[in-house]
């Protein structure tokens, strides 16, 4: 129940609504703007300073972390001095507002600007309507990129989630569970570029009759078994599957860890009841465990699907998109930074964004449904 004093201080009417929202906006912008100014001035001071390196590092930490923390404390204190009703209205925005403002500035504004650029020519001096989108949806190279992304999405996601689920189940039953999981999860610590470099050595091909010994691991195994070395990354469409193997190698550990934690949360009473009713281990797994961890499986699957849609690093490092391995993100990179066509690159980026949005919406809806229960 609000007191009479609080009710009188509560912002009401159109003017109250405008004032409250204006206050929220100002509070949201105050912290990031002042933080930027303070950090920028601190950067200029430290850049021109002749102090020892260790002193500069310590000052930078105190200036950055301590300054921002102090700024939040001061902002919160100022809001708490207002009437209680205004404090309840404005205080959440002291902490949430800056994050929302920063996301809007670095995500929403660039996305809107990219949308505008997608309707302009290569140097953004004239409007060309839907020409860039027509190119992106009809060009042979772009259609090839769409096909390859579909392969990554179907096979990469299926094998990553499937192997992650299988390893999670088997590892949970082993006495060396932590060791097995650490080994499988280890590739997650490697960057995508680093993984591409590692696997490029595995797929390396020197060529028949070159007189140079094959150093690629896969070709070395083939030669040891009496076969002939192959240019694995130059054989379409199989080279796409050789690249997908890298994604599976990287993402299986992630899927395994998340799914394993969900499996450990399955109540033992449910599994015991299923066994008492005569269900085998396989039947208990598919009829009890899988339905119970369905939400986790959906989350992991949609996360890896989004990764496969915006995949770039592996293809860029391994093949550069040549020999039928191009993907949407790599074509965006080529159009913008190699061919210098900002309009086409922006249209490709918007199409990629549109392709990701339905997956994100589905994931959020599933999350909300799980919270409702």
Image (spheres, rainbow, N blue to C red):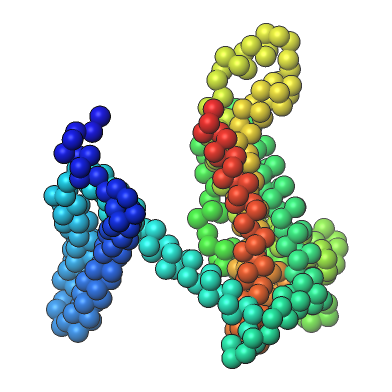
Residue drawn at x 71%, y 23% as measured from the top left = 287
Nearest the eye: 355 or 249:
355
Splitting the image into 4 quarters, where does residue 228 fall?
bottom right
Splitting the image into 4 quarters, where does residue 147 fall?
bottom right
Residue most extreme to the top: 276
Q: Is residue 95 left or right of residue 335?
A: left
Splitting the image into 4 quarters, where does residue 344 fall?
bottom right
Q: Is residue 65 above or below residue 163?
A: below
Nearest the eye: 349 or 323:
349
Residue drawn at x 59%, y 80% as measured from the top left = 117
Q: Is residue 210 above or below residue 38?
A: below
Observer able to see residue 168 = no
Q: Is residue 280 left or right of residue 294?
A: right
Pick the quarter of the image with the N terminus.
Answer: top left
Measured from the top left, where is residue 143 in percent x and y?
A: 79, 70
Pick the quarter of the image with the C terminus.
Answer: top right
Residue drawn at x 30%, y 56% as measured from the top left = 15
Measured from the top left, where is residue 33 in percent x and y?
A: 28, 69
Measured from the top left, where is residue 42 in percent x and y?
A: 20, 74
């Amino acid at each position: 129940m609000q007191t009479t004093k609080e009710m009188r201080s509560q912002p009401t009417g159109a003017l109250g609504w405008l004032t409250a929202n204006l206050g929220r906006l100002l509070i949201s912008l105050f912290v990031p703007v002042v933080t930027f100014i303070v950090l920028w001035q601190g950067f200029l001071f430290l850049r021109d300073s002749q102090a020892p390196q260790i002193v500069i590092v310590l000052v930078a930490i105190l200036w950055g972390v301590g300054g921002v923390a102090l700024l939040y404390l001061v902002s919160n204190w100022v809001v708490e001095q207002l009437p209680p009703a205004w404090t309840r209205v404005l205080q959440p925005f002291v902490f949430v507002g800056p994050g929302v403002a920063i996301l809007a500035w670095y995500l929403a504004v660039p996305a809107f600007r990219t949308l505008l650029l997608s309707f302009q020519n290569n140097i953004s001096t004239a409007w060309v309507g839907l020409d860039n989108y027509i190119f992106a949806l009809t060009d042979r190279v772009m259609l090839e990129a769409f096909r390859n992304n579909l392969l990554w999405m179907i096979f990469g996601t299926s094998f990553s989630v499937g192997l992650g689920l299988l390893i999670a189940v088997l590892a949970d039953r082993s006495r060396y569970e932590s060791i097995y999981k650490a080994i499988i999860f280890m590739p997650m610590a490697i960057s995508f570029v680093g993984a591409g470099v590692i696997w490029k050595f595995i797929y390396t091909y020197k060529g028949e009759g070159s007189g140079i010994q094959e150093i690629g691991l896969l070709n070395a195994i083939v030669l040891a078994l009496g076969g002939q070395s192959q240019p694995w990354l130059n054989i379409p469409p199989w080279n796409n599957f050789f690249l997908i193997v890298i994604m599976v190698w990287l993402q299986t550990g992630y899927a395994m860890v998340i799914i394993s934690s969900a499996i450990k949360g399955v109540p033992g009473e449910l599994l015991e009841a299923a066994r008492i009713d005569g269900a085998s281990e396989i039947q208990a797994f598919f009829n009890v465990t899988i339905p119970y961890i369905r939400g986790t499986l959906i989350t992991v699957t949609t996360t890896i699907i989004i990764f496969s849609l915006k995949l770039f690093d592996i293809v860029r490092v391994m093949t550069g998109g040549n020999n039928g391995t191009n993907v949407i993100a790599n074509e965006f990179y080529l159009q913008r930074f190699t061919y210098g066509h900002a309009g086409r690159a922006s249209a490709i980026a918007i199409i990629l964004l549109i392709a990701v949005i339905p997956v994100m919406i589905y994931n959020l809806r599933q999350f909300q449904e799980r919270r409702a229960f």
